[in-house]
Each structure stands twice: as C-alpha cells, then as structure tokens.
Image (cartoon, helix red, strand yellow):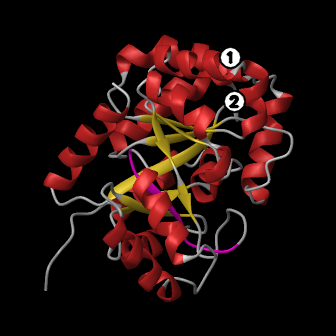
Amino acid sequence: MGKAKMESYFKQKQANDEKLFVPYIMAGDGGLDVLNERILFLQNCGAAAIEIGIPFSDPVADGPTIQAAGLRALDNGTTLSGVLQTLQAGKNERNIPIILMTYINPIYRYGVTSFAQGCAAAGVDGVIVPDIPMEEEKFLADEFQTSSLAFIRLASLTSTEDRLKEIAKRSEGFLYAVSVTGTTGAREAYVEEVKAYLEMLKSYSSVPVLAGFGVSTAEQAQTLSSYCDGVIVGSTIVDLFHHGDVEGVKNLIEHSAQPTTTS
C-alpha cells in the first residue's frame, strides 16, 4: 500500500511504454455518491493514478474551473471526513493509486495524525499539500512516513536550481513539476519553454516526473510527456465531468497516454 503501491503501479505502466496520465477530480463535485464510480471509470480508461481534490474555501493554487468545482462541492456539503469515508467504502473495488490534494488548513483542523491515519485506512497512497513550504514540512513528512503515504512535492519554474535539486531529492511517488507560473487552468503556446526545466528535473529525480498545471489537450500532454514521464490534467477533466462528457474524458486519457514511439 501507499508509496510501494504507487511505485509498483507506475513501473507496470512504464514497462508497457506508456506515459503516466493522472487525472484530477474534485471530491464532491456532483456529489460524493459519484466519487467511487468516477474512480473506477478513470481506472478503466487507463489512468496511472487519480488525484482527488479536497474542496477548500481559499484554494490559492487553483484556477477558475477548479475553484468553481470546489465551491459546488462545498455547497453539496462535502467534508474531508466524508471524502475519507467514501474512499474507504470503495477501496476494495479499485487497484489504482489514489492521491489527495489538500491545503494545510483542512489537515490542521482534522488533526495531522488523524489525517494520515485516515488516509491510510481509506486506501489513499499519496498526498499533495501545495501551500506548505519545504522548510516547514517535517511535521507532515513524519506523519506521512508513519502511515506509508507518499509525500508528493511540487517543483516550480521560479525556484532556484539548488532548491529544485532538494525538492526532487525529497519527493516520493512522483515529482509534480508545475509547468507554468500561476494557477491551474488550460493555456496555449507554453510547451516549448518548459522543455529544459522538465529535462533538468528528470536528471535530478529518482521518481517519475509528471508535468501539471495548464495541460488541457492530448497534444499538449503528448508533447510534455516526451520531456518527462507523464502529465496531470485537472481543469479539462473537471469541466468534462461537470458537463457530463464522459466520452470526452475517456478519449483524452486514451490519446494522451498512448505508448511512446521511437523514430
């Protein structure tokens, strides 16, 4: 479970020459009663893992699409406790790694130890906390280590090379390479400028490097994946689910995670 499960699942995908595609969904957007159903759907579509957002009232890293999804989830009465209970109820039906993305405030309110233990009980394999700096993360890292949770770190384009080396050294499960400056959301014409950045992170990291923030099309996903190990797609997936376009979700995953080819 936890880190070991994610590592094993990723290696299996990569052994088949697949790039890793990690879709992001907002827990409670559409109701918690559809969460496990969506997880199984994404698993069957070929996702390498699923990142699940915990709705929060002040989501500083999220763009408009995911902010709106979070507000819809909060309006539905979604809580961290409810998400963990829902994931625990469905954990025996899935085999795909589950990653929670949450800000530090909900963890504090829930209790750091209780959160880590609750994640482990719910079959969560990794956690992303975008608003906790490296210098202040030890209290989380220790608890995640005790519960065998992968602590997935984010690398930023604006960080120094020395800092990126340290972040890459610490990251577990995979290294989340933020491929734009700013918040999440679809963008155009930014791919080439991050090539050197992603290749640099690959040279530092012992875990897969996945590019996220701003990835919105299969073409972008394929191009970015050629510089690293795969991508995370959030806003487009959230929008497709919100509008009931499950076929669009399936097509995006299938076309983004096609086996790599050599020329």
Query: Which residue corresponds to mark 1?
Result: 82
State the image coordinates of residue 79 (x, y, percent, origin top left): 75, 22
Residue 234 vs residue 93: left or right? right
Can you say whether 226 is above or below 207 in the image? Answer: below
Q: Which of marks 1 and 2 is nearer the N terminus?
A: 2
Residue at 13% in and 86% down: 263
Residue at 40% in and 51% down: 174
Residue at 30% in and 32% down: 5
Inspect this view and state whether residue 218 appears. Answer: yes
- Give the Cα distance between marks 1 and 2: 9 Å
* Amino acid type for the residue under numbered disc 1: Gly
Q: Which of 166 and 79 is in front in this view?
A: 166
| SS at badge 1 | helix
Can you say whether 106 is above or below 66 in the image? Answer: above
State the image coordinates of residue 220 (x, y, percent, origin top left): 46, 75
Label 2 Cα neighbours within 10 Å, binned few <14 / some 14-19 / many ≥20: many
Query: Which residue corresponds to mark 2?
Result: 28
- Residue contact at pointers 1 and 2, CB within 8 angstroms: yes
| SS at badge 2 | loop
Can you say whether 101 is above or below 159 in the image? Answer: above
Q: Give the range drawn in magenta.
A: 173-181
The part of the image, by quadrant, that contains residue 229 is bottom left
State the image coordinates of residue 214 (x, y, percent, origin top left): 60, 69
Q: Was residue 45 drawn as part of the magenta stretch in this picture? A: no
Query: Which of the two discs, 1 and 2, sits closer to the camera?
Result: 1
Label 1 Cα neighbours within 10 Å, binned few <14 / some 14-19 / many ≥20: some
Q: Which of 131 and 93 is in front in this view?
A: 131
Q: Was residue 180 drawn as part of the magenta stretch in this picture? A: yes
